[in-house]
């Protein structure tokens, strides 16, 4: 008897046996896990990269920044005037140390329009990235 | 139903269709896992893990090989990785010495009424790598090429291992039958 015949013989015998089986609820357990994977995948697809809270924060910041510029009354023309204008508008305590610190703080904001511009550009880039990644996930 | 159609249905978003594949292959996946891990709980866990891995990467299944070959390859590798992590004693296929010896190992000698029972008992006695090869080749009708894909063996090595595994199986069956006759 050659190997091919032995193979055929054993193959025939193997069809008669029963392999070890997993527990009764195995396929249900696997499918539950598969549904969980699918649910996570779906949630990931529909959830935007940048959440709602982030956009509320950006919106509020933009509104506040706008109000700030309007309140300064000088626009973007005189950067140091913004600081001095604000010092006049806000009640500042008479303590000289505190006043000096406050003045230094507003002085450091002298480049505000440029900062605002950068923030707006960065926010736009984030918005673009959000749209891009959201569309990539959806496919 | 055509397996490739089912796979396509799953890819299109019909998750329920995957249950057909689970029902179709769960016994072989589980029995390989059980043989490697030697523990039913671990085997069920790793069998489940194998199906989930297959589901997750179904988009990468190109249909060049059979789905079963692809799934068994995932199962085999998942179970071996887990066995290594848990330090389950496992004899790697490649670490065994190989030799060809011709002898009479005809399975036709066993009485027909008992041979399925002897075969099941003998299979349980086989080391994990022999068991895997026998089940894949004789039960699942996987080709030598498929077995090479699943186990990572070379073609010649797979043939030699299979030859040896069959001889071991025959010897185990003979021993079981001899014991039963004596008792």
Image: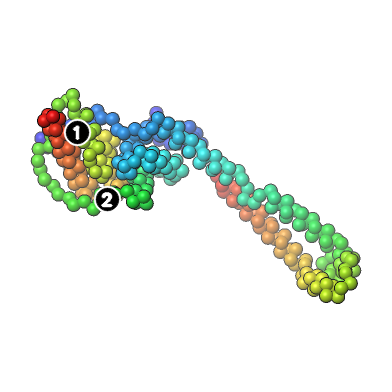
Q: Is residue B46 above or below residue B120?
A: below
Q: Is residue B118 above or below residue A130?
A: above
Q: Chain of mark 2?
A: B
Instruction: Tell whether label 1 touches label 2 (CB within 8 Å).
Output: no
Residue at 40% over, 30% down: A24
Which label belongs to residue B92? 2
Total labels: the figure holds 2
- Residue B68 lies, in percent from the top left, at 35, 38
Residue at 9% over, 38% down: B104
Residue at 28% over, 30% down: A18
Q: Chain of mark 1?
A: A
**Left or right: A40 with respect to A2?**
right
Q: Is residue A8 above or below residue A59?
A: above
The crowding category of the residue bearing disc 1, from other C-alpha atoms within 10 Å (few below 14, some 14 to 19, many at least 20), is many
- Residue A67 lies, in percent from the top left, at 83, 58
Asked if residue A110 can be seen in this view, the reply is no
Residue at 26% over, 34% down: B139
The image quadrant that residue B101 belongs to is top left
Quadrant that contains the C terminus of chain A: top right
Kindly identify which residue carries mark 1.
A10
**Left or right: A61 with respect to A135?**
right
**Left or right: B97 with respect to A25?**
left
Quadrant that contains the N terminus of chain A: top left
């Amino acid at each position: 008897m050659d190997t091919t015949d032995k193979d055929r013989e054993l193959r025939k015998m193997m069809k008669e046996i029963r392999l070890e089986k997993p527990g009764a609820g195995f396929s249900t357990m696997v499918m539950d896990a598969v549904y969980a994977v699918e649910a996570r995948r779906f949630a990931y697809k529909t959830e935007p990269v940048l959440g709602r809270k982030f956009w509320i924060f950006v919106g509020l910041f933009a509104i506040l920044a706008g109000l700030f510029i309007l309140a300064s009354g000088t626009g973007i023309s005189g950067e140091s005037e913004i600081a001095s204008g604000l010092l006049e508008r806000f009640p500042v305590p008479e303590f000289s140390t505190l006043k000096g610190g406050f003045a230094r703080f507003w002085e450091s904001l002298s480049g505000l329009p440029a900062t605002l511009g950068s923030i707006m550009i960065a926010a736009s880039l984030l918005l673009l990235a959000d749209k891009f990644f959201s569309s990539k996930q959806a496919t | 139903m055509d397996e490739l159609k089912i796979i396509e249905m799953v890819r299109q978003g019909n998750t329920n269709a995957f249950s057909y594949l689970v029902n179709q292959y769960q016994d072989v996946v589980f029995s390989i896992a059980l043989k490697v891990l030697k523990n039913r709980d671990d085997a069920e866990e790793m069998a489940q893990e194998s199906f989930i891995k297959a589901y997750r990467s179904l988009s990468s299944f190109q249909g060049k090989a059979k789905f079963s070959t692809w799934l068994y390859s995932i199962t085999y590798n998942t179970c071996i990785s887990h066995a290594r992590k848990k330090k389950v004693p496992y004899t790697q296929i490649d670490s065994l010495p190989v030799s060809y010896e011709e002898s009479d190992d005809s399975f036709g000698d066993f009485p027909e009424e008992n041979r399925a029972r002897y075969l099941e008992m003998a299979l349980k006695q086989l080391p994990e790598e022999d068991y895997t090869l026998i089940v894949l080749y004789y039960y699942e009708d996987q080709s030598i090429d498929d077995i090479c894909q699943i186990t990572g063996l070379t073609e010649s090595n797979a043939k030699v291992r299979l030859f040896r595994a069959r001889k071991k199986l025959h010897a185990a069956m003979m021993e079981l039958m001899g014991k039963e006759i004596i008792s």
